[in-house]
Amino acid sequence: MSGTVYMIPVTLGDSDPEMTIPRGTREITLSLRLFAVEDIRSARRWLKRLDRTFPVDSTTFFPIGKHADPSNPFKILDSVSKGVDAGVMSEAGMPGLADPGNIIAAEAHRRGIRVIPLTGPSSVMLALVASGLNGQSFAFHGYLPVDKAGRKKAIKDLERCSSGGQTQIFMETPFRNAKMVEEILSVCMPATRLCIAADITLSGEEIRTMSVAEWRKQVPVLDKRPAIFMILA
């Protein structure tokens, strides 16, 4: 009988795990000895944060993502097919959202292996429910193009899509936040609503929704804080 693949949430930063990770999620995570992870070092640190006695040295980790061996998802699922349970972890938040964990889930479904999402924080969902924007129709686009022209075009396209009432959600690498804010405010129409959700679940959490015209009067200083952006025309 096959094992199970668990999609394991991780805190959004250095917040206390007990504040956002339910006991059941922690218990299942600590019962596993096979993981697919974005980064092995951060995964080992996370497991030690959950339990200082966790045996990381006798646990198997398979890195997944751009620079990892593309055969790793198949290797880990070969073990799951033989009855071993495995966990998939992102560096922060839920695996599979702006994260390569979906590769494992997709292959697991192809093989008929059960995939169970565990309860925990998702910056995308938490930002949306606090934004006041349309939570019944929305689209998440992950990261926009890095080049200036491509990013501006993407923002214009998303604003156009949002004019039909669908909230458009996207994110940026923290060190490029200032450029992202600058371009949203220069490209979008004054009446378009913009939500910026920064440091979600952390002590400096700030989630605000205003019109672009209002944001232009008080441009936020995000520095390198992790943030989610949402627009609705």
Image (cartoon, helix red, strand yellow):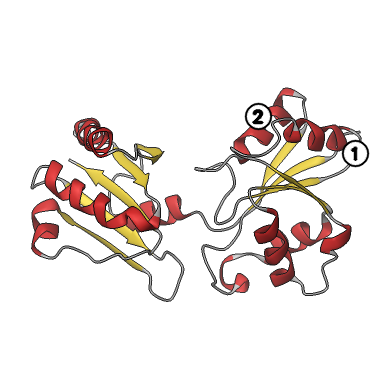
Q: Which residue is drawn at 66% across and 41% down?
A: 64
Instruction: Report x, y in % for residue 188.
Output: 14, 42
**C-alpha gap between disc 2 and disc 1:** 18 Å
Q: Is residue 24 above or below residue 81?
A: below
Q: Residue at x 80, y 38 (%)?
A: 76
Classify mark 1: residues with Cα within 10 Å, few (<14), some (14-19) or many (20+). Answer: few
Looking at the rendered image, the quarter that the N terminus falls into is top right
Looking at the rendered image, the quarter that the C terminus falls into is top left
> Mark 1 and mark 2 in contact (Cβ < 8 Å)?
no
Quadrant assignment, res 58: bottom right
SS type, badge 2: helix
- Three-letter amino acid code at disc 2? Ala
Q: Residue at x 34, y 36 (%)?
A: 145
Residue 106 marker: 2
The residue lying furthest to the top in this view is 110
Q: Which residue is drawn at 27% across and 49% down?
A: 133
Instruction: Report x, y in % for residue 68.
Output: 67, 39
Q: In this view, does 176 lie above or below 224?
A: above
SS type, badge 1: loop
Q: Is residue 102 above or below residue 193?
A: above
Instruction: Report x, y in % for residue 185.
Output: 15, 50
Quadrant assignment, res 49: bottom right
Residue 2 marker: none
- Asked whether, in this view, residue 17 is left or right of residue 60, the answer is left
> Which residue is more in the foreground, 126 or 101?
101
Quadrant assignment, res 213: bottom left
Query: Which of marks 1 and 2 precedes in the sequence?
Result: 1
- Three-letter amino acid code at disc 1? Gly
Instruction: Report x, y in % for residue 50.
Output: 71, 69
Q: Mark 1 points at which residue?
A: 83
Classify mark 2: residues with Cα within 10 Å, few (<14), some (14-19) or many (20+). Answer: some
